[in-house]
Image (tube, helix red, strand yellow):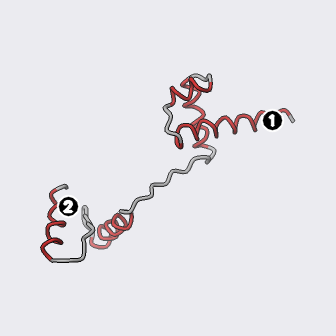
């Protein structure tokens, strides 16, 4: 029974460290100070959380559809790279300006 209690406490500590670091944005040194742990212990707890599958990072972006189209273009057309840029419905001149800006930034 002691093992399951210790496991529970260990998992709870990992959870706390993961939330403080990835959700609240605290630095590992600050977490260590707040929880009275060494910085290396905090680092190990984060690594354990990753290994146990407790951490999932997702990037939500309004540009994801554009990135997906770029990947498809690269694959289908066998390109080295591709840039897809959003355009505002309107004049061909504004579309050309947007494409020019995207090309200039690469």
The secondary structure type at the circle numbered 1 is helix
Where does residue 72 sit, x and y in percent of width and height?
34, 70
Where does residue 35 sit, x and y in percent of width and height?
62, 26
Apparent side of residue 56 relative to residue 60 in the rendered image (left or right) = right
Apparent side of residue 61 relative to residue 87 in the rendered image (left or right) = right
Screen quadrant of the N terminus:
top right
Per the rendering, the mark at residue 102 is 2
* Foreground pick, 29 / 91: 91
Q: Is residue 11 above or below residue 41?
A: below
Identify the image quadrant of residue 82. Answer: bottom left
Q: Is residue 13 above or below residue 98?
A: above
Screen quadrant of the C terminus:
bottom left
Where does residue 31 sit, x and y in percent of width and height?
55, 29
Q: Residue at x 55, y 51 (%)?
A: 56
Identify the image quadrant of residue 19. Answer: top right
Apparent side of residue 104 relative to residue 58 in the rendered image (left or right) = left
- Pointer 1 residue: 5
Q: Residue at x 61, y 23 (%)?
A: 37
């Amino acid at each position: 029974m002691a093992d399951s209690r210790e496991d529970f406490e260990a998992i709870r500590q990992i959870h706390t460290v993961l939330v403080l670091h990835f959700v609240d944005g605290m630095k590992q040194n600050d977490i260590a100070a707040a929880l009275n742990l060494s910085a290396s212990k905090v680092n190990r707890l984060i690594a354990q959380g990753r290994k146990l599958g407790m951490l999932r990072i997702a990037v939500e972006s309004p540009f994801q559809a554009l990135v997906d189209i770029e990947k498809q273009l690269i694959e289908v057309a066998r390109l080295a790279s591709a840039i897809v840029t959003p355009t505002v419905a309107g004049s061909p001149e504004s579309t050309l300006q947007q494409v020019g800006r995207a090309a200039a930034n690469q």
